[in-house]
Amino acid sequence: MAGRIEARLEELGIALPQPMAPLADYVPYVQSGNMLYVSGQLPLIGDRVVTGQLTEADHVESEAPPDSRLAEAAEAARLCALNMLAQVRAATGDLDRVRRVVKLTGFVNCDGSFAQQPQVVNGASTFMGTVFGEAGRHARSAVGAAGLPRDAMVEVEGIFEIG
């Protein structure tokens, strides 16, 4: 029987992907006590990574139109969060064990002229709130990076409290 969080994902029409294998010499997650640290996850759709670097030309004054690069980047951050949940389920066996999303750190592939990293990483933050409700509200950092693995547009890592 699916748990509460898996039922919520199903209600949203979301299926968790297979957890991504590490790209180098690290593990996808580490649990220490009741804390689960999940390595950075990329925006994968099947075997394809959402790629690209954002610039000042991608800035949007208000809400990002659906066809903008900023909206594409926020969706890439949501995909990172989805892949992170696949790792959490692999680590815990049951997403209902998540007591709280403690912190997310988002890295946005951008040059020095881009300054809307928080709007990009909102894609991951909003997703966690939608899935976990109040327990999905978290501390966060949104950082610009000159390059990411496999030219990914975004990478997100997370810390979860597990019960």
Image: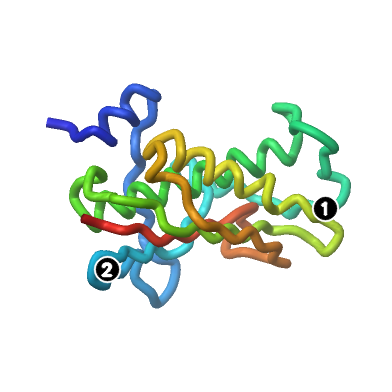
Q: Is residue 51 above or below residue 74?
A: below
Can you give x and y, in whole percent of width and height, for residue 6 in the image?
A: 27, 34
Query: At x 73% / y 41%, what residue is drawn?
Result: 70
Can you give x and y, in whole percent of width and height, for residue 93 in the image?
A: 18, 50
Q: Nearer the viewer, residue 81 or 61?
A: 61
Q: Please state which amino acid type lies under the numbered disc 2.
A: Gln
Q: Label 1: few (<14), some or many (≥20) within 10 Å?
A: some
Looking at the rendered image, the disc whose residue lies closer to the viewer, 2 or 1, is 2
Left or right: where 140 falls relative to 160 = right
* Quadrant of the rendering where the N terminus is positioned: top left
Q: Please state which amino acid type lies under the numbered disc 1.
A: Thr
Determine the residue located farthest toward the front in the rendered image.
134
> Residues under labels 2 and 1: Cα distance?
36 Å
* Quadrant of the rendering where the C terminus is positioned: bottom left
**Tag 2–tag 1 contact (CB < 8 Å):** no
Q: Which residue is mark 2?
A: 31
Left or right: where 96 falls relative to 70 = left
Q: Label 2: few (<14), some or many (≥20) within 10 Å?
A: some
Q: Which residue is mark 1?
A: 55
The secondary structure type at the circle numbered 1 is loop
Query: At x 59% / y 38%, what residue is drawn?
Result: 75
Query: At x 60% / y 54%, what residue is drawn?
Result: 154
The first of marks 2 and 1 along the sequence is 2
Can you give x and y, in whole percent of width and height, for residue 109 in the image?
A: 69, 58
Q: Is residue 148 above or below residue 128?
A: below
Quarter-of-image position of residue 67: top right
Query: At x 52% / y 57%, what residue is drawn?
Result: 139
Q: Nearer the viewer, residue 52 or 136?
A: 136
The secondary structure type at the circle numbered 2 is strand
Can you give x and y, in whole percent of width and height, for residue 144 in the image?
A: 70, 62
